Image: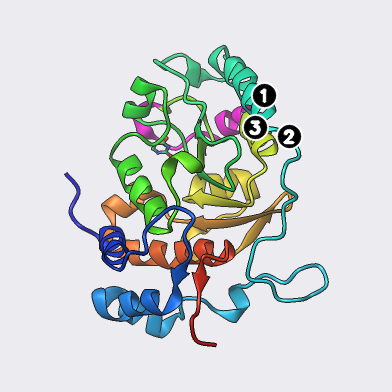
Amino acid sequence: MMENDIFDEIIGFLSEEGEISRYADIDGDLLEKFNSCKSPGAAALSKSKPMIRESDVPSDSAGKKSDTVTYAESSSKSHGDKRKELEDLAGQVTGCRNCRLHLDRKNTVFGSGNPDAKLMFIGEGPGADEDEQGLPFVGLAGQLLTKMITAIQFDRQDVYIANIVKCRPPGNRNPFDDEATQCLGYLQKQIEIIRPEVLVLLGAVPLKFLVGKTGITRIHGNWLEYKGIRTIPTFHPAYLLRNPSVKKDAWDDLQKVMQAFGKVYRKSP
Ligand code: URA
């Protein structure tokens, strides 16, 4: 049983204000109110680091500031075509024996969600619960991820969730370089099929293998790019469970995702 955290608080706060619903816009003043009143931790954070900074807003190719996502060209494929391509790819993953991780698996964990997702989350690899069920992020870390997704006004069924490796590394260790490299092609193909507008990298492993960077504590919350797709690293939910004080930093990062989707509006100019 997870204790209440900043994600429960924001979900509760926005629900009370009648603001929580999927793909809804959020009143920025309410968010500020939450950040400054409801959570002392977040209040301190928002003083030192404004919730939405001008520099966080991407420039388009003409250098014009834009507060909505325009980077990735959305896929021209139909929902049915994407579903079929993902199913075919999942079939390949089920039979994969490219690395040693296939030896101990109960199930491959391909990924799950909406083939038309605009937002995609990338984790490391399956744990015991995921290996058992063949689905990503279904254990405790998954429960936290679901709350993180709800807090930014998305519904878990509308996003897509996948991992760097599709089979469980023994003892939940990080995947070795050769395992991740052997598996990466599947994830790259998933991203190509889904073509989301924003990728959220959960922790150091996807940061390393998808965009070739290290230093999650330094880089989290900064916009990066993966094949023309706006990409933002934040902390892995399992890390947040072990280090609850870092949840406010993850919340700060995730607010940038809401902002990128133009979900935060201001009543007053
Ligand atoms: N951790 C991950 O990185 N992925 C999962 O699917 C579950 C836990």
**Residue 30 picture quarter:** bottom left
Q: What residue type is labelled 3?
A: His
- Rendered view: 230 above or below 177: below
Residue in the image at 28% along x and 51% along y: 241
Span shown in magenta: 170-183
Would you call the spot at circle 2 few (<14 residues within 10 Å), some (14-19), or many (20 or more)?
Answer: few
Query: CB at mark 3 closer than 8 A to ligand 1?
Result: no
Label 2 sits on residue: 77
Q: Is residue 175 magenta?
A: yes
Q: Does the magenta stretch include residue 95?
A: no
Q: What element carries label 1?
A: helix
Considering the whole magenta stretch, tell me its main secondary structure: helix
- Rendered view: 199 above or below 126: below
- In the rendered structure, which disc, 1 or 2, sits on the residue that comes first in sequence? 2
Label 1 sits on residue: 85
Front label number (1 vs 2): 2
Label 3 sits on residue: 79
- Quadrant field for ligand 1: top left
- Rendered view: 10 above or below 211: below
Query: CB at mark 1 closer than 8 A to ligand 1?
Result: no
Specify whether residue 220 is in view: no
Q: What element carries label 2?
A: loop
